[in-house]
Amino acid sequence: MNKTILRTVQAHILMIIAAVSVLLCLPGCSRQAEADRDEKLIRVGFSQVGSESDWRMANTASMISALSEKNGYELIFDNAKQRQENQLLAIRNFIQQDVDYIVLAPIAESGWDDVLQEAKDAGIPVIIVDRQIAVRDESLYTSWVGSNFLAEGQRAIRWLEGTVQQQGRLNKPLRILHIQGTDGATAQIQRTKALDDAVRTHPGWTITARLKGEYTEAKAYELVRDYLSTGDQIDVIYSENDNMSFGAIRALEEAGISYGKDGDVMIISFDAVRDALEMCLQGKINICVECNPLHGPRVASLISQLEAGETPAKLTYVDETFFSSGVLNEELIREREY
Ligand code: AHR
């Protein structure tokens, strides 16, 4: 056999050996590769409040996209449908499943001590996102990231003061209809505080009624419709989120009451989701105070810090602003992510 033929035969033999060994290893090796990959995924249980608003949907989308498999996470998502008992159940399930991290977007501030103590006893770090929690022992959670809801409320109030001053009625009577979000949520407590503080310092300002709109359009619509049917006159609607503003606007339209920039009732709204910004640009909503829902990458960054053995900040407030029709344009709205 000459050398060329010999090399060809050897090469064929090697190829056959390689192919056979791949075939023999195939089921076991691929299972192993899969296991290795899964082992590397960080398992996160996320208890979300619900799907009550456009803001919430944008928040959920941001969390799911940041904590995706391609980013190295296995996300176990639970929608609590606006019920705290569902959140308690979800957290206990996450503990049973021995996840690496629990992320909680709490419906309200209180009621977490026991379940978070259980998570702590199981050695699972807890990250709080969006609203805050009030616990006896601050070590029950590792970090929180979200909005400064008091600053949001104060932004709205400063705008209102400036606007009525321009109209020459800063110290004149101002009748405010207040639509509140879910009782006990930080967003509700702090936005309400900003309004209460302002009413105390402006003798002419009164809150004509407080309606519990639960952050949903449907509830706010019903309540505002019934309220307007009493014939009470109002100058301002202070609505603690955009979806409740949409409901209130529907009720105003049905009652034939003008609103917005050139109307009888000023609309102050929180969140600044795309549909609300469009309405603000059209002059239907006077001011949209931004509440940023894009917390997914922020939570992922907190987890990365913990994975690297670092100690992340206990509290992280996100930067926010507000929009009135003067500063808005179609391009700005199009470019926003939510
Ligand atoms: O906690 C944030 C609030 O919750 C948002 O303002 C509201 O839209 C959401 O449902």
Image (cartoon, rainbow, N blue to C red):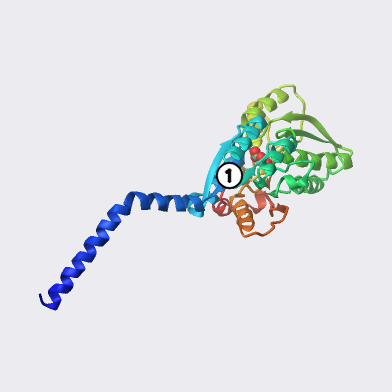
63 or 189, nearer to the observer: 63
249 or 9, nearer to the observer: 9
Report whether the residue tagged 1 is closer than 8 Å to ligand 1. no
The residue furthest front is: 1
Tell me where residue 246 sits by quadrant. Answer: top right
At x 69% / y 57%, what residue is drawn?
A: 312
Quadrant occupied by the N terminus = bottom left
Q: How many marks?
A: 1
Give the quarter the ligand 1 occupies: top right
Q: Secondary structure at mark 1?
A: loop
Residue 177 image position (x, y, % from top left):
76, 33
Viewer can see residue 186: yes
Residue 88 image position (x, y, % from top left):
66, 34
| Three-letter residue code for mark 1 | Val
Residue 146 image position (x, y, % from top left):
68, 48
The residue furthest bottom is: 3
301 or 259, nearer to the observer: 301
At x 18% / y 73%, what residue is drawn?
A: 7
At x 80% / y 43%, what residue is drawn?
A: 194
Viewer can see residue 216: no
User: Residue 18, relative to residue 328: is it above or below?
Assistant: below
The reply, left or right, for residue 191 in relation to residue 279 is: right
The reply, left or right, for residue 188 in relation to residue 81 is: right
The reply, left or right, for residue 316 in relation to residue 75 is: right
Mark 1 = which residue? 99
Q: Is disc 1 surrounded by few (<14), some (14 to 19) or many (20+) residues within 10 Å? A: many
56 or 17, nearer to the observer: 17
